[in-house]
Image (tube, rainbow, N blue to C red):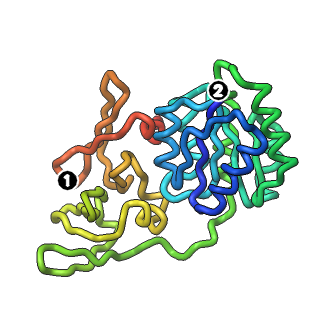
Amino acid sequence: MPSAVVAEDEALLREELVARLREAWPDLEIAAACEDGGSALEAIAARKPDVAFLDIRMPGLTGLEVAAAAAQASPATQVVFVTAYNQYAIDAFERGAIDYLMKPIDPARLAGTVKRVKSRLGAKDAGSAELAALVEKLRAGLPAEGRGEPLQWITASVGKETRLVLVEDVAYFKAEDKYTVVMTPEGEALIRKPIRELLAALDPAVFKQVHRSTIVNMRAIAGITRDETGRGTLRLRNRPETLAVSIPYMALFRNM
């Protein structure tokens, strides 16, 4: 049975896409329906689906970043981008081995996409070279995201004291029970905002998810080492501890 991972951060749109896929492709198994890029990448790496339907705009890792990492984590997985932008990348999509769907999903377009994906099932790789080139082109042409300024300050608790923490001073964030730990060179503090909400509020060019429970400030990284299993370990500039990088996220550091 063919399988798919669906990634869309808006719940109603995610449910609609899953429902339309079940109509257009009844024997397709939805292996995972994810609400952010990090969970989508982990699902792709773990499940090795035949196809991944990726929203381009997602908190933390974008659909483009997930696709680039998935090309290494699961080379045979085909990628279908889901986008609300109908001009900036259509030519690039049409010339590549990658398909796309516009929001809202048109059943006729989806049927055509399903037909093309089926015709490529079983390929040893899903055009990973074309995908890598396309991702770089799309990143350069992606319109500015219509959202507010990235988070600048965080109100955090240190014992009984409440402090204002400048976001650029944060080395990393780590989920811990009901809290998120904020680590700076001076020490740690706690906030109640969950990791997923932080991803949506932080500057995506500076803060990257490297593990299901960890977001790191890329400017705080001193270096990275890789072990024989492919996992990574980050050294930080102003913190003594190291951070584990899950295998799917190692593609973010391929140029380091």
At 25% from the left and 59% from the top, the residue drawn is: 177
**Residue 196 quadrant:** bottom left
Q: What amino acid is at disc 2?
A: Met
Q: Mark 2 to mark 1: distance in Å?
A: 47 Å
Query: Where residue 52 sits in the image (x, y, percent)?
Result: 63, 39
**Number of numbered discs:** 2
Residue lying at the far left of the rendered structure: 159
Q: On the rendered structure, is 146 left or right of 154? A: right
Q: Residue beneath label 2, please?
A: 1
Query: Where residue 231 sits in the image (x, y, percent)?
Result: 34, 32
Residue lying at the far right of the rendered structure: 108
**Front: mark 2 or 1:** 2
Residue 24 makes an appearance in the image: yes
Query: Where residue 54 sits in the image (x, y, percent)?
Result: 63, 47
Q: Which mark, by number, is residue 239? A: 1
Q: On the rendered structure, is 49 left or right of 82? A: left
Q: Which mark, by number, is residue 69? A: none
Q: In this orientation, which residue lies closer to the viewer: 197 or 146?
A: 197
Q: What amino acid is at disc 1?
A: Arg
Q: Is residue 167 above or below residue 207?
A: below
